[in-house]
């Protein structure tokens, strides 16, 4: 192989190492033939594409001037020829920068003579001999390569040329090239002629400039042979005419505009705005859009005078007309990208705000496709991709310092009101609609491939599919139940498809979300649905009906509603087809009669509760709760499908107003309407499942409403105890489990779930337990559970808690001071699975909803209640007991060292603590409430090491000395930051201030109604009245208990005394005879009593002895005298009688004390004890 060594001389041209002879035998070339050295002029002529672009004629779409406007049209031209002419035009335009007084340009093209001339009346070229080159300056500029006035890159120059080729290339590719210039300063005129591609030149002709003229004119005849041409084409003349118009519109106007003539005809325009209007109606519409007149708006308020920017809406593709220093950058470049990105981002922000419910992301490049930009700018020392200069590649960082463009506010407003946002959104919807159509199903598909689908055998079969039913189930376990039931009815006409949880709410979803949702697309495919089609029958579908089979709980109702919402929103005509939409109901509770083969099924919880209350048959029946369809076994499934007509319900065709109900329930914007709807809720309502047909209004108002209320109940606390249901269950379960002492959170969660019959996952219980035990700043003011282990810190707001398997807890001592044991028998306890569980609400001695606050978002309602100081609350309760006015309270968080102050309008200002030090540092020792230290540290890191987004203030460095409970940051400030701190103060500078609002304090009141409270004081007043009434109940119950105990003691002492005195003999006698003697001596019957609603006190022997309660019943096996019969034989003594009499006297004293003590005194004693315990806890 022949090795070829490269040379460092760029003008050395290697030729092929071997050439072929005519006979096919290669002939070796000499070294001299292989390596040749060319002059630079020869190199340019030999490799012209390197310098001027292609010299081959080509067809290309170009802007040309035609019929008094500029249009884009496919023309034939030679790029290289166009480039050499353009170099002369740009040189003439550059002269306006050198000489602001320049006022005229003339461009003439003579096709017959193959002659082009460019004239301008700016400063002439200095007519003197260059001292170093020993030639006249005009000859040096136009007749010698690599000469330029633009080589100093340190000098800011706004010219088009900079590399020293420019006009010389025009000379090189011309058969004749004439320079004419007039130098007023030197009083001379200059003319010189070059011929034969600049290889020949005549001596310059210098004459006197007696009239004092200033001008420069270049006249040349392009060497058409170098471009494969014989004449200048008509298209090429139109192209040059367009460039003449470019000059008229783009050349700098100050201090006065220039006149441009083309072929002796004056061009009427002389500014960029008028120039841009020449493009009006020139763009061909795309994508079927109708042509419309362009409304080009300009940025008249741009601060940088070097930029002229116009904007209009394009028709489907990004269009730009741009100039840099009079150079036409037909392919754009970094200057165009910078402007386009800024405008597109502004439009995107607006479009996104208009499409809040549409989560699909419209990209900026898609927005650009609807933009047309007109840009005329002056940029210092620009650089380009190549000598053709159709793309500027100067990096943005190099021109934004002096020539950055920023759209003015007025321009932004004009753009956003131009209709561009609506057009972009319409385009996005059109594209998404096309995508929706692509996902359409079809009936003719006999077999389809959808994961987890068990297709009916006759689905999609002509004439048979309409008799088939698709069953949508809630999960795989429900599908398994259906498959077990299909063994009864067969799979010919029944298909089953499991849903993965809750279906997408298509009413609030974007089309891209819908397109990207696999389940929605699967359902369309399975049913054979076509987007946008109006259905009058099911003949064109793969299935004739759709059956919903979900759990009978609240979440199952929600899924059912989401499926109805999907059909109503996307295929509303299907709901008008009788019998299309069905549901399959299963029992949520089955009660089996003890000792008999008798079962009653209940399909809603309220239905079961109403039955249990009405029949009082809890003891005779054993209930079984069916958490989900997976609880049913194969036997149940077969039973369900054997009685298909019993379990199948048909949704009726919508009546007037029912579709609006669906929209109200699922439209994100209908929050106010949902609030009004939920205000109509009445406890105990449920669907009548005995009917065969279901009205949509009944489903919404009697079933879906229960889900919405359940969502609110889970999310919004009770005003009475401050608890949400999960927290109430945890307290109840923890009290019941307290004898076990400290327990792992995971174990306690399991115990709580068992004790309270909680039917959901234990993870949520674990999270609730952790939350109730947290004690860091910003969490609980009173933690009712003891945190033993890592329960989270203010570093991450509790999210850094350890796993429930590793941390322990127990009931805190103060819990039973706040939730007093004497109140337990007064509460109304819930019944779950025939067992008494947690109460409807506890009745603490102070409003815990104010002590620990609350946050929550439900359906139609949300709540936000800050924490308050327990001492402030107690002080106000004392004031109310004395009939004094309450003192307005300010939110308070245990351990918070900053300041919270009343800012008015239900708002409180919260400030951290920051100290400015003498050494240009700032010490931050407290953050606003619930601004976690990790969150703030990340903000400081952004201030220290800015990345994409420049922060409002920067710092040099910071030290983090924070612990799990204390805050300490030391900030080292930059000069800018220090100046800002001096102006604004450290709190404002570092955003160490925020607000707490009290305008959304929503709770369930004691009657279970949602209520918005105006203030913390309004909550306190309502709580006060309720709590005081319960102290009255507590006193009454205590008196009853004391009197009951007194009577026991009194009767026992009488009985023993009668026996001792032998007035009453009961040994070796019939019991009934003894009872008659008891009655004879007026001994009272006292029956043993048992609380049927709860057994909580029985497990708290360490606190007090069990006592009878209001809800007590007699034992059927007790005569009422068992308390006498059970006295031990050793009790029949005089000493025992004396002891009983002493106890009786003591009990009478207790009764008197209780009678003398008011309910308020009971309350004050409790609160006083609480304050003592709280101060040390």
Image (tube, grey):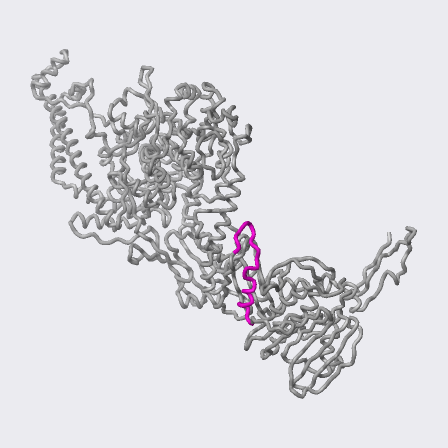
Task: Classify 138 as above or below 319.
Answer: below
Task: Classify 92 as above or below 211.
Answer: above
Of residue 281 and residue 79, the one placed in the foreground of this image is 281
Task: Classify 111 as above or below 488.
Answer: below
Q: How many marks?
A: 0
Is residue 273 a member of the stretch shown in magenta? yes
The percent coordinates of residue 780 (x first, y second) are 34, 46
Q: In the drawing, does residue 138 fall left or right of residue 476?
A: right
- What residue is shown at x 71% (from left), y 58% (from top)? 58
Can residue 729 be seen at all in this image of the molecule? no
Is residue 330 a member of the stretch shown in magenta? no
The percent coordinates of residue 697 (x first, y second) are 33, 35
Q: Which residues are magenta?
A: 270-291
The percent coordinates of residue 356 (x first, y second) are 43, 49
The percent coordinates of residue 710 (x first, y second) are 34, 37
- What residue is shown at x 11% (from left), y 28% (from top)? 1141
Q: In the drawing, does residue 1083 fall left or right of residue 185?
A: left
Q: Main secondary structure of the magenta part?
A: loop
Of residue 748 and residue 492, the one placed in the foreground of this image is 492
Res. 198 image quadrant? bottom right
Task: Classify 120 as above or below 979.
Answer: below
Can residue 435 be seen at all in this image of the molecule? yes
Q: In the drawing, does residue 1128 fall left or right of residue 288?
A: left
Res. 169 image quadrant? bottom right
In the picture, the quarter occupied by the C terminus is top left
């Amino acid at each position: 192989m022949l090795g070829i060594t490269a040379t460092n001389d760029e003008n050395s041209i290697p030729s092929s190492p071997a050439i072929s002879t005519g006979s096919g035998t290669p002939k070796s070339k000499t070294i001299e033939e292989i390596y040749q050295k060319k002059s630079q002029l020869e190199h340019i002529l030999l490799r012209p594409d390197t310098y001027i672009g292609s010299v081959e004629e080509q067809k290309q779409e170009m802007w040309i001037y035609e019929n008094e406007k500029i249009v884009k049209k496919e023309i034939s031209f030679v790029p290289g020829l166009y480039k050499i002419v353009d170099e002369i035009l740009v040189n003439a335009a550059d002269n306006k920068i050198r000489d602001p007084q320049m006022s005229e340009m003339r461009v003439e093209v003579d096709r017959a003579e193959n002659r082009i001339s460019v004239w301008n009346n700016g400063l002439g070229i200095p007519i003197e001999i260059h001292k170093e080159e020993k030639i006249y300056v005009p000859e040096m500029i136009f007749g010698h390569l690599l000469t330029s006035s633009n080589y100093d890159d340190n000098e800011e120059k706004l010219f088009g040329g900079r590399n020293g080729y420019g006009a010389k290339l025009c000379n090189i590719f011309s058969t004749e090239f004439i320079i004419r210039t007039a130098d007023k300063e030197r009083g001379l005129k200059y003319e010189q002629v070059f011929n034969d591609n600049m290889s020949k030149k005549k001596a310059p002709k210098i004459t006197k400039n007696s009239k004092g003229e200033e001008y420069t004119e270049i006249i040349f005849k392009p060497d058409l042979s170098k471009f494969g041409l014989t004449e200048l084409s008509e298209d090429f003349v139109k192209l040059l005419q367009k460039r003449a118009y470019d000059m008229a519109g783009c050349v700098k106007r100050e201090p006065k505009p220039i006149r441009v003539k083309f072929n002796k005809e004056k061009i009427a325009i002389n500014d960029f705005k008028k120039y841009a209007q020449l493009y009006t109606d020139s763009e061909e519409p795309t994508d079927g859009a109708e042509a419309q007149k362009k409304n080009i708006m300009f940025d008249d308020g741009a601060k940088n005078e070097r930029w002229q920017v116009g904007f209009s809406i394009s028709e489907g593709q990004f269009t730009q007309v741009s100039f840099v220093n009079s150079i036409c950058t037909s392919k754009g470049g970094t200057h165009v990208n910078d402007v386009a990105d800024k405008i597109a981002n502004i439009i995107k922000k607006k479009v996104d705000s208009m499409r809040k419910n549409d989560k699909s992301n419209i990209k900026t490049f898609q927005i650009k496709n609807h933009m047309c930009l007109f840009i005329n700018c002056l940029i210092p020392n620009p650089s380009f991709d190549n000598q053709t200069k159709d793309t500027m590649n100067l990096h943005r960082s190099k021109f934004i310092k002096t020539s950055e463009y920023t759209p003015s506010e007025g321009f932004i407003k004009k753009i956003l009101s131009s209709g561009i946002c609506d057009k972009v959104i319409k385009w996005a919807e059109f594209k998404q609609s096309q995508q929706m159509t692509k996902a359409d199903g079809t009936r003719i598909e006999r077999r389809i491939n959808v994961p987890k689908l068990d297709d009916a055998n006759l689905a999609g079969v002509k004439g048979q599919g309409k008799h088939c039913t698709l069953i949508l189930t809630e999960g795989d376990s429900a599908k398994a139940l259906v498959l077990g039931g299909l063994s009864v009815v067969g799979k010919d006409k029944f298909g089953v498809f499991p849903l993965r949880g809750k279906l997408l709410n298509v009413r609030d979803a974007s089309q891209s979300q819908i397109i990207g949702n696999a389940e929605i697309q699967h359902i369309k495919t399975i049913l054979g649905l076509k987007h946008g089609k109006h259905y009058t029958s099911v003949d064109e579908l793969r299935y004739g009906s759709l059956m919903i089979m979900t759990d009978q709980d609240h979440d199952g109702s929600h899924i059912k509603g989401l499926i109805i919402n999907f059909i109503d929103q996307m295929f509303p005509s299907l709901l008008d087809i009788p019998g299309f939409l069905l549901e399959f109901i299963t029992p949520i509770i089955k009660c089996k009669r003890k000792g008999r083969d008798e079962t009653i099924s209940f399909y809603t919880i309220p239905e079961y509760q109403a039955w249990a209350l009405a029949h009082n048959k809890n003891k005779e029946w054993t209930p079984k709760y069916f958490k989900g369809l997976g609880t049913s076994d194969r036997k149940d499934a077969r039973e369900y499908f054997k009685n298909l007509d019993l379990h199948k319900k048909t949704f009726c065709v919508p009546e007037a107003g029912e579709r609006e109900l669906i929209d109200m329930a699922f439209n994100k914007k209908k929050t106010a309407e949902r609030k009004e709807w939920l205000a109509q809720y009445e406890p105990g309502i449920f669907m009548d499942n005995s009917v065969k047909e279901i009205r949509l209004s009944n489903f919404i108002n009697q079933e879906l409403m229960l889900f919405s209320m359940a969502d609110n109940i889970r999310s919004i606390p009770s005003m009475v105890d401050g608890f949400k249901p999960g927290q109430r269950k945890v307290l109840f379960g923890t009290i019941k489990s307290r004898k076990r002492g400290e327990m792992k959170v995971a174990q306690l969660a399991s115990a709580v779930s068992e004790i309270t019959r909680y039917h959901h996952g234990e993870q949520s219980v674990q999270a609730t337990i952790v939350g109730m035990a947290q004690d860091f700043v910003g969490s609980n003011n009173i933690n009712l559970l003891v945190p033993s282990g890592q329960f989270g810190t203010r570093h991450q707001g509790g999210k850094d808690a350890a796993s429930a398997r590793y941390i322990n807890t127990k009931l805190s001592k103060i819990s039973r001071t706040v939730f007093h044991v004497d109140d337990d028998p007064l509460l109304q306890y819930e019944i779950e699975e025939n067992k008494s569980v947690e109460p409807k609400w506890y009745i603490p001695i102070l409003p815990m909803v104010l002590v620990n606050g609350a946050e929550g978002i439900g359906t139609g309602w949300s709540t936000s209640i800050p924490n308050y100081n327990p001492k402030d609350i107690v002080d106000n309760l004392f004031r109310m007991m004395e009939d004094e006015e309450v003192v307005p309270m300010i939110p308070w968080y245990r351990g918070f060292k900053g300041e919270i102050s009343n800012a008015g309008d239900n708002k409180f200002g919260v400030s951290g603590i920051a100290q400015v030090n003498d050494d240009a540092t700032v010490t931050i020792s407290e953050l606003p409430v619930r601004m976690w230290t990790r969150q703030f540290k990340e903000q400081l890191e952004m201030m220290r090491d800015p990345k994409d987004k420049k922060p409002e203030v920067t710092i040099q460095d910071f030290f983090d000395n924070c612990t799990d409970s204390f805050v300490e940051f030391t900030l080292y400030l930059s000069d800018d930051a220090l100046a800002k701190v001096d102006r604004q103060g450290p709190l404002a500078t570092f955003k160490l201030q925020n607000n707490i609002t009290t305008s959304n304090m929503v709770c369930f009141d004691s009657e279970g109604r949602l209520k918005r409270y105006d203030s913390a004081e309004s909550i306190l007043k309502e709580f006060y009245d309720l709590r005081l009434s319960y102290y009255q109940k507590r006193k009454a119950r205590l008196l009853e208990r004391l009197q009951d105990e007194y009577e026991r003691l009194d009767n026992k002492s009488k009985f023993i005394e009668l026996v001792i005195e032998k007035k009453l003999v009961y040994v070796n006698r019939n019991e009934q005879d003894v009872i008659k003697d008891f009655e004879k001596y007026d001994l009272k019957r006292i029956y043993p009593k048992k609380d049927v609603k709860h057994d909580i006190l029985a497990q708290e022997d360490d606190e007090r002895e069990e006592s009878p309660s209001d809800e007590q019943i007699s034992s059927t096996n007790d005569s009422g005298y068992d308390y006498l019969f059970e006295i031990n034989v050793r009790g029949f003594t005089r000493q025992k009688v004396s002891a009983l009499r002493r106890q009786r006297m003591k009990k009478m004293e207790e009764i008197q004390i209780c009678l003398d003590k008011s309910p308020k005194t009971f309350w004050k004693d409790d609160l006083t004890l609480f304050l003592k315990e709280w101060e040390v806890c």
